[in-house]
Image: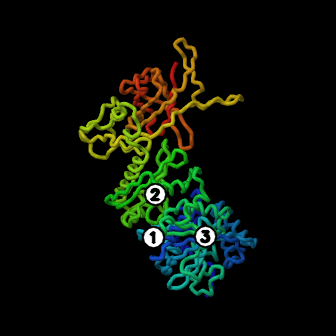
Amino acid sequence: MATDYHFGKTDGGDVAGFNDPVAANFAYEGNLTDSLIREAIQNIIDARLLGKSPARAEFDLKNVPVKSLPNPERLEQIFRKCAEYAEKRKVVPAAKHYKSQADVLKSGASVPLLRIADYNTCGLTGDTNDGRWFMFMRGVGFNAGEAGAGGAFGLGKGAFFANSLFRTIFVSSVTDDGVKFAGKLRLLSFDQDNELMQGNGTFGLPGQFPIQNKKDIPEMFQRRDKGTDIWVVNFLGSNDWQDTICRSVLGWFWPSIHWGILTVKVGDKEFNAINLRERMSEFFSPDEKKSFKPHNPLHFFDAYTNSEKKLTESPDVLGEFSFYGRTSDDLPYPNKTALVRNTGMIVDFKTRSSHLTKYAAIFECRNKKGSEILRKMENPAHTEWDWHNWKDEHGHHVEDGKIAYNELELFIVGGLGGLLYAPVSQSTSIPGLAEHIGVPTKEGSSANIGEAKNQVKEVVEEETGIEIGSDIEDTASSFHTIRPIRVARYIRVRTENPPIPPGPPTPPRSFDVPNPLPEPDDKGKSVKSQELENATARYIVGNKMKDGRIYRVIIHTDNKKEKPVVRIRLYARGDDGSDELLSMSNVVGERGTKIFKLGQEYCDFSLDDSGSAYLSVQLKEPWIVALEPNLRILP
């Protein structure tokens, strides 16, 4: 039978537009190659043969003359018909796109084909009505139904089409039952012989059946070993493709490779459990700050294999999971927690607000039950866990999903608390610290902390503080005291900018403090203040008020020769290094600290005989920020 491109008639049904719902899940991703690599390797891990671990993924790219593609003249004709229909519907971008791709075919030029091959896999088993072949080539929105499977919605194939300027792929698969080959296209609807055709079509036999006779398969697409080859035609990521794919593989799949369930070859680069750390060092530097996903895998790999903090728990719904974390004062750790289940792919990076101690952490759930639940909580693009994604057959949210998500959240908060904060007895010797921030006494009561009482029922998700909330019912004894008390290990005290060389003056930002800071005396004359030298500051995030949030701040200096009056300004520090001067609603002095003057953006206070001060500061902003104080001695 003759092979050709086949499309079904709409027969009054849906008409496909340029934004195909399958490809559209990925068409607006910031990095389409990342989406492709994630989806391709997930499928490969899903097809891994039992007892033949690891699965192997190979990526290579070559430029092929368009005349080598199956029936290029017919494909050009289809593209031009798509452009005509788009013009008729006044969809200008679609018309331009298909015209340009038709011109490429007419020119006879070469186009890049990315081959994605897998080995030690079962191939696309089944047929056009069932199994893996059906799921990949025909099925849309079907649940994979396996705990170890990467996909849950059956929409992952969209990444392959989103990465093809032709919106076309060719698939060749060898299984125990034989060989299958077909092309798959997700185009715009078009008119053919006065009939409106579907945009979803195939290259193969009439009836959109695959070719199963090896001699009828074009030679360039033939495969011998069990497994699958997928060819992405006119691959749009062909520039620097090898480095881009290598970085993507390492960024998203280093757990799979480290666990020994996956090996990867990209061009001439091999990735396996033995050389993983070495390969990471070829494509990433420890001091490289990567602000977009996937974040620098060196930071997470080192946190996983040489962790400062490791926790394992087994809650009721998700079962056993683990936390690994590491901090660094020198390296640009991203303050993220990588989320991983049993496929070994990083699904997402959980973010917290800026923290003064840089960290990298990993949440890992590898048990079958928990991984199945997490898979059901994934979105179609497999880039998040959200309990709202898990619904039953009636479209209702599944209660276990909400419970599981809360288990995950609380566990990560606890892991980060143990990683980022040291008990007071281990982190400071400032007198009276425990009383100031409300340590429970041996009898179980909380120390008096003046107006800043710790009775709020709110989970604080910021690592500059700790969890100070509770979901339990409000009773006389149910308010949550801070246990164990933890404070930030280190806070950088902000100093003024050093003098700049002579030159044209640059107007300061609205929140910059001039250097040196002029202070008027009683007669209105301007005098200069000085930095409070050798000063340290610590703080914890307190409860949220109706018009702001409380921070408990401890300041200490070793200079005890005098008792100066100190002015404090607080800045919010962003992840990108930016800062903003914060407004204070109120400041209460604790343990004898005297407040002399409170302005909108500063407070003047005293130090005690030990060189310490204890402040409960209410900021006007209710959100949680990483503080950077500026301390100056008033004349």
Residue at disc 2, secondary structure: strand
Q: Residue furthest right?
A: 107
In this rendering, the label closer to the viewer, 2 or 1: 2
At x 58%, y 50%, the residue is 287
Q: Is residue 133 visible?
A: no
Label 1 to label 3, Cα distance in Å? 27 Å
Precedes in sequence: disc 1 or disc 3:
3
Tell me, yes or no, whether the two marked residues, 2 and 1, touch with CB atoms within 8 Å: no
Which numbered tag is attached to residue 339? 2
> What amino acid type should be assigned to the residue bearing mark 3?
Phe
In this picture, residue 76 sits left or right of residue 159: right
* Quarter the N terminus occupies: bottom right
Residue 360's place in the image compared with 274, above or below, is above
In this rendering, the label closer to the viewer, 1 or 3: 3
Residue 160's place in the image compared with 3, above or below, is above
Label 3 to label 2, Cα distance in Å? 25 Å
At x 41%, y 64%, the residue is 366
Which numbered tag is attached to residue 142? 1
Q: Is residue 59 visible?
A: yes
Precedes in sequence: disc 3 or disc 2:
3
- The x, y position of residue 23, in whole percent, is 56, 65
Which numbered tag is attached to residue 59? 3
> What amino acid type should be assigned to the residue bearing mark 2?
Leu
- The x, y position of residue 412, in whole percent, is 40, 52
